[in-house]
Image: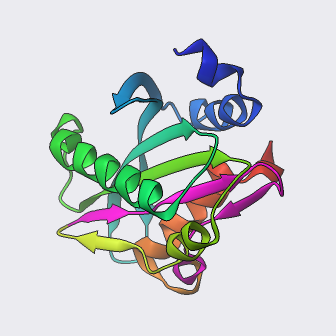
Amino acid sequence: MNTNLMENTHVSAICEQLKQDDFKFKEEKFDYLDVLLATGVQYNMSWLKTTQVNIFTFMGVVEKISMEFAVAYSRMALSYAMKNHKNFPKQMNNITASFPLLISSCIDDDAKQWIQQKPKSQLGFHEMPIILDTDNKTLLFCNESTRRSGNKKFLAGLIQKYFNPTNS
């Protein structure tokens, strides 16, 4: 694993959370940015069905987050997940979730507004961008997801479980 990324206390704490659920780790490069990719599977169980949730988590640490950068990073992560989701064994009901996480102490206001918009979904792929503000120790993502039911609410719960800085 990338020692620079693992030296970041937030990344190492998140990795510990993910390791508890048997996530696998791999280094990737998105343009000039080194990211740590974690992949794993969780199951959303309901009365009627169980949904296999294939998870791609991308962790990147940057000096400053602009809206343009956050949008591009999120799209690259979703594209990667769409190309590589076939590596998971399939069940009847499955979805793929992309959690592009950016960690920084300097976040533009427009990036904060964009990150809290309704998450994007298309054909079983869910884009759930996240920003960890290290100055305020706050997690920014679309809070609307927590008020829903089903898969969106389950994914919002995973965000809190794995990425919330107060859990570490």
Identified at 82% across, 52% down, the residue is: 135
Name the quarter where the C terminus is drawn.
Answer: top right
- Residue 32: x and y in percent read 39, 29
Q: Please determine whether, in this image, residue 4 is positioned above or below residue 87.
A: above
Q: Is residue 117 magenta?
A: no
- Residue 1: x and y in percent read 51, 14
Residue 142 falls in which quadrant of the image? bottom right
Identify the magenta region: 124-145
Q: Is 136 in front, or is 89?
A: 136
- Residue 105: x and y in percent read 74, 48
Q: Please determine whether, in this image, residue 32 is positioned above or below residue 122.
A: above
Q: Position of 28 compared to 92: left or right? A: right
Q: Is 94 in front, or is 166?
A: 166
Number of marks in the image? 0
Identified at 36% across, 27% down, the residue is: 29
Q: Is residue 143 magenta?
A: yes
Is there any visible trace of residue 14 in the rendered image?
yes
Identified at 50% across, 73% down, the residue is: 114
